[in-house]
Amino acid sequence: MNSLSLDGREQGRGYVSAKLFNRHSQTAKKNTTEAEKKLWQHLRAKQLYGYKFKRQQPIGDFVVDFVCFEKKLVAELDGGQHADEVHVIKDAARTDWLQSQGFVVLRFWNHDVLQNMDGVWDVITQHLMPES
Protein backbone atom coordinates (compact mmCIF):
# COMPACT_ATOMS: atom_id res chain seq x y z
CA MET A 1 0.00 0.00 0.00
CA ASN A 2 1.37 3.39 -0.92
CA SER A 3 1.05 6.50 1.22
CA LEU A 4 1.63 10.18 0.65
CA SER A 5 4.75 11.98 1.77
CA LEU A 6 4.67 15.41 3.36
CA ASP A 7 5.03 17.09 -0.03
CA GLY A 8 2.11 15.11 -1.50
CA ARG A 9 4.16 12.70 -3.61
CA GLU A 10 3.17 9.09 -3.49
CA GLN A 11 5.50 6.89 -1.50
CA GLY A 12 6.14 3.38 -2.65
CA ARG A 13 9.00 1.01 -3.37
CA GLY A 14 12.14 2.98 -4.14
CA TYR A 15 11.15 6.17 -2.31
CA VAL A 16 11.92 6.98 1.30
CA SER A 17 10.95 10.46 2.49
CA ALA A 18 13.83 12.60 3.68
CA LYS A 19 12.11 13.16 7.03
CA LEU A 20 11.62 9.43 7.60
CA PHE A 21 15.20 8.65 6.54
CA ASN A 22 16.66 11.37 8.77
CA ARG A 23 14.66 10.12 11.77
CA HIS A 24 15.79 6.52 11.13
CA SER A 25 19.39 7.58 10.55
CA GLN A 26 19.56 9.57 13.79
CA THR A 27 18.09 6.69 15.79
CA ALA A 28 20.36 4.12 14.12
CA LYS A 29 23.49 6.15 14.77
CA LYS A 30 22.56 6.55 18.45
CA ASN A 31 21.96 2.80 18.72
CA THR A 32 25.03 1.67 16.80
CA THR A 33 26.29 -1.69 18.01
CA GLU A 34 29.93 -2.34 18.85
CA ALA A 35 30.16 -4.56 15.76
CA GLU A 36 28.82 -1.78 13.52
CA LYS A 37 31.30 0.69 15.01
CA LYS A 38 34.18 -1.72 14.46
CA LEU A 39 33.28 -2.51 10.85
CA TRP A 40 32.66 1.16 10.06
CA GLN A 41 36.14 2.02 11.33
CA HIS A 42 37.50 -0.34 8.66
CA LEU A 43 35.20 0.72 5.82
CA ARG A 44 35.03 4.48 6.20
CA ALA A 45 37.24 7.00 4.43
CA LYS A 46 37.87 4.78 1.38
CA GLN A 47 40.23 2.54 3.33
CA LEU A 48 39.39 -0.51 1.24
CA TYR A 49 41.09 -0.11 -2.15
CA GLY A 50 39.62 3.37 -2.48
CA TYR A 51 36.00 2.17 -2.54
CA LYS A 52 33.55 4.43 -0.78
CA PHE A 53 31.13 2.85 1.67
CA LYS A 54 28.15 4.57 3.24
CA ARG A 55 26.29 3.45 6.32
CA GLN A 56 22.58 3.43 7.07
CA GLN A 57 21.61 4.13 3.46
CA PRO A 58 18.12 3.75 1.97
CA ILE A 59 17.71 1.36 -0.94
CA GLY A 60 14.09 0.91 -1.95
CA ASP A 61 12.01 0.35 1.18
CA PHE A 62 15.06 -0.74 3.18
CA VAL A 63 17.88 0.98 5.01
CA VAL A 64 21.02 -1.14 4.75
CA ASP A 65 23.85 -1.18 7.27
CA PHE A 66 26.69 -0.54 4.79
CA VAL A 67 26.79 -0.15 1.02
CA CYS A 68 29.35 0.47 -1.70
CA PHE A 69 27.22 1.78 -4.57
CA GLU A 70 30.11 1.61 -7.05
CA LYS A 71 30.35 -2.18 -6.63
CA LYS A 72 26.67 -2.68 -5.63
CA LEU A 73 27.85 -4.42 -2.47
CA VAL A 74 25.80 -4.44 0.72
CA ALA A 75 27.12 -5.61 4.09
CA GLU A 76 24.53 -6.37 6.76
CA LEU A 77 25.34 -7.14 10.40
CA ASP A 78 23.03 -9.42 12.32
CA GLY A 79 22.69 -9.80 16.06
CA GLY A 80 21.23 -12.81 17.84
CA GLN A 81 17.65 -11.68 17.23
CA HIS A 82 18.17 -12.45 13.53
CA ALA A 83 18.29 -16.16 14.32
CA ASP A 84 14.57 -16.36 15.14
CA GLU A 85 12.19 -17.59 12.44
CA VAL A 86 10.48 -14.23 11.85
CA HIS A 87 13.79 -12.43 11.29
CA VAL A 88 15.11 -15.23 9.08
CA ILE A 89 12.08 -14.86 6.79
CA LYS A 90 12.26 -11.04 6.73
CA ASP A 91 16.02 -11.07 6.13
CA ALA A 92 15.63 -13.56 3.26
CA ALA A 93 12.96 -11.38 1.61
CA ARG A 94 15.15 -8.29 2.07
CA THR A 95 18.18 -10.08 0.59
CA ASP A 96 16.12 -11.41 -2.33
CA TRP A 97 14.82 -7.93 -3.16
CA LEU A 98 18.27 -6.33 -2.93
CA GLN A 99 19.71 -9.06 -5.17
CA SER A 100 16.90 -8.48 -7.68
CA GLN A 101 18.16 -4.89 -7.88
CA GLY A 102 21.68 -6.09 -8.71
CA PHE A 103 23.24 -5.88 -5.25
CA VAL A 104 25.47 -8.53 -3.72
CA VAL A 105 24.45 -8.93 -0.08
CA LEU A 106 26.94 -10.12 2.51
CA ARG A 107 25.59 -10.99 5.95
CA PHE A 108 27.82 -11.26 9.01
CA TRP A 109 26.97 -12.10 12.59
CA ASN A 110 27.99 -9.39 15.05
CA HIS A 111 30.23 -11.85 16.90
CA ASP A 112 32.12 -12.56 13.63
CA VAL A 113 33.00 -8.88 13.32
CA LEU A 114 34.01 -8.68 16.97
CA GLN A 115 35.99 -11.94 17.08
CA ASN A 116 37.14 -12.53 13.49
CA MET A 117 37.51 -9.16 11.79
CA ASP A 118 40.27 -10.55 9.54
CA GLY A 119 37.85 -13.16 8.16
CA VAL A 120 35.12 -10.56 7.59
CA TRP A 121 37.66 -8.27 5.93
CA ASP A 122 38.77 -11.11 3.62
CA VAL A 123 35.20 -11.82 2.48
CA ILE A 124 34.49 -8.15 1.74
CA THR A 125 37.84 -7.78 -0.04
CA GLN A 126 37.11 -10.79 -2.28
CA HIS A 127 33.93 -9.09 -3.49
CA LEU A 128 35.72 -5.81 -4.23
CA MET A 129 38.66 -7.19 -6.16
CA PRO A 130 38.43 -7.09 -9.94
CA GLU A 131 37.63 -10.40 -11.56
CA SER A 132 40.60 -11.99 -13.32
Image (cartoon, rainbow, N blue to C red):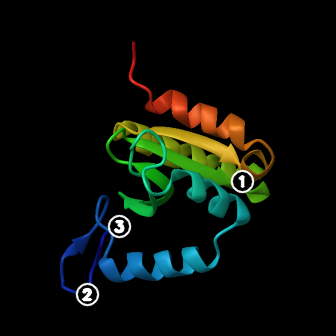
- Per the image, the residue denoted by label 1 is 82
Q: Give neighbour class at mark 3: few <14, some 14-19, many 20+ (Cα, 10 Å).
A: few
Residue 33 shows up from this direction? yes
Between 10 and 78, which is closer to the camera in this rendering? 78
Label 2: which secondary element: loop
**Residue 35: x and y, percent?**
70, 58
Q: Closer to the N terminus: mark 2 or mark 1? A: 2
The quarter of the picture where residue 50 lies is top left
Between 115 and 66, which is closer to the camera in this rendering? 115
Q: Is residue 26 above or below residue 127?
A: below
The quarter of the picture where residue 120 lies is top right
Between the residue at mark 3 and the residue at mark 2, the CA separation in whole angstroms equals 16 Å
The quarter of the picture where residue 38 lies is bottom right
Q: Closer to the N terminus: mark 1 or mark 3? A: 3
- Per the image, the residue denoted by label 2 is 6
Q: Residue flagged by tag 2: what amino acid is it?
A: Leu
Q: Residue flagged by tag 3: what amino acid is it?
A: Met
Label 1: which secondary element: helix
Q: Identify which residue is drawn at 81% across, 46% down.
A: 115
Between the residue at mark 1 and the residue at mark 3, the CA separation in whole angstroms equals 26 Å
Q: Give neighbour class at mark 1: few <14, some 14-19, many 20+ (Cα, 10 Å).
A: some
Q: Identify which residue is drawn at 48% across, 42% down.
A: 48
Label 3: which secondary element: loop
Disc ID at residue 1: 3
Q: Closer to the N terminus: mark 3 or mark 2? A: 3
**Residue 27: x and y, percent?**
55, 80
Q: Is residue 42 above or below residue 120?
A: below
Side of 65 where 72 appears, left or right: left
Q: Is residue 21 above or below residue 65?
A: below
Between 109 and 101, which is closer to the camera in this rendering? 109
Q: Identify which residue is drawn at 56% across, 39% down.
A: 106
**Residue contact at pointers 3 and 2, CB within 8 angstroms:** no
